[in-house]
Amino acid sequence: AQSVTQPDIHITVSEGASLELRCNYSYGATPYLFWYVQSPGQGLQLLLKYFSGDTLVQGIKGFEAEFKRSQSSFNLRKPSVHWSDAAEYFCAATGGFKTIFGAGTRLFVKA
Amino acid sequence: DGGITQSPKYLFRKEGQNVTLSCEQNLNHDAMYWYRQDPGQGLRLIYYSQIVNDFQKGDIAEGYSVSREKKESFPLTVTSAQKNPTAFYLCASRLAGTGGTGELFFGEGSRLTVL
């Protein structure tokens, strides 16, 4: 069955520290991959997406993600976290008209 | 500005009542989606529509109904048959023709609470 797994329910990092959020997918073929961010009580906003080509993709707000086919992973990274990055992050995959979401990782940022 | 508008933002319902959540988009997108969000479970697909007058069940369609009479509108009705309707509901849209390559655009959500 197709699935997206985010192993970390929540992560706490200090402001200014680096961040990596993990995402693994299970699909018959390489799907199109996305990272979205959600602030409390709001909708989701696209951070970045991967379709093909360069496996390191850049997104908004200083985020980047690396696609690794051998590990079926699409991890999100940021070199230096800001307090405003505290939110919930969702990894998603689609191979057609339906998009599958991971359960999300909530990021806490401490001063 | 183009976008997706969901209303109401907050809704309270007594058990046994049907409620309808509105979703309107002015992005000229053909495909529209309804997701349900519960803590720790991510987003689960309720219904989706790729074109006017056509829609398909998602993974958790039981107790819900939709219509797609206009391209811009995709209302969701939560019926009394839905056993646990308290949740955050998100509407989204996407350009058709991009298949799975286009990202989803989301509204700001509607929080339904059953009293």
Image: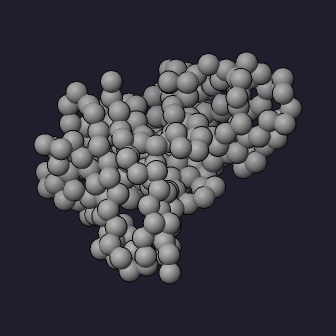
Position above or below: A72 against B108: above
**Quadrant position of residue B86:** top right
At x 41%, y 51%, the residue is A8
In the displayed structure image, the side of residue B8 where residue B100 appears, left or right: left
For the image shown, how many numbered marks are present on the structure? 0
| Residue A49 visible to the viewer | no
Q: Nearer the viewer, residue B60 or A13?
A: A13
On the image, which quarter does residue A28 sit in? top left
Residue A26 seen by the camera: yes
Q: Which of the image's four quarters has the C terminus of chain B?
A: top right
Left or right of A80 in this view: B86: right
Residue appearing at x 26%, y 31% in the figure:
A27
User: Residue B19: x, y in percent?
Assistant: 77, 31
Left or right: where A15 falls relative to B73:
left
Which of the pair B7/A45 is nearer the observer?
A45
In the displayed structure image, the side of residue B26 where residue A36 appears, left or right: left
Give x and y (percent) for residue A34: 34, 49
Where is residue A76 shown, x and y percent of the image? Answer: 31, 58
Q: Is residue B82 above or below residue B22?
A: above
On the image, the x and y values in percent for residue B21 come to 70, 37
Which image quadrant is residue B102 in?
Answer: top left
Q: Residue at x 38, y 59 (%)?
A: A47
Q: Quadrant of the N terminus of chain B?
A: bottom right
Q: In this rendered view, identify the residue nearer to me: A50 or B114.
A: B114
Q: Residue at x 68, y 45 (%)?
A: B110
Q: What's the colour scheme?
A: one colour
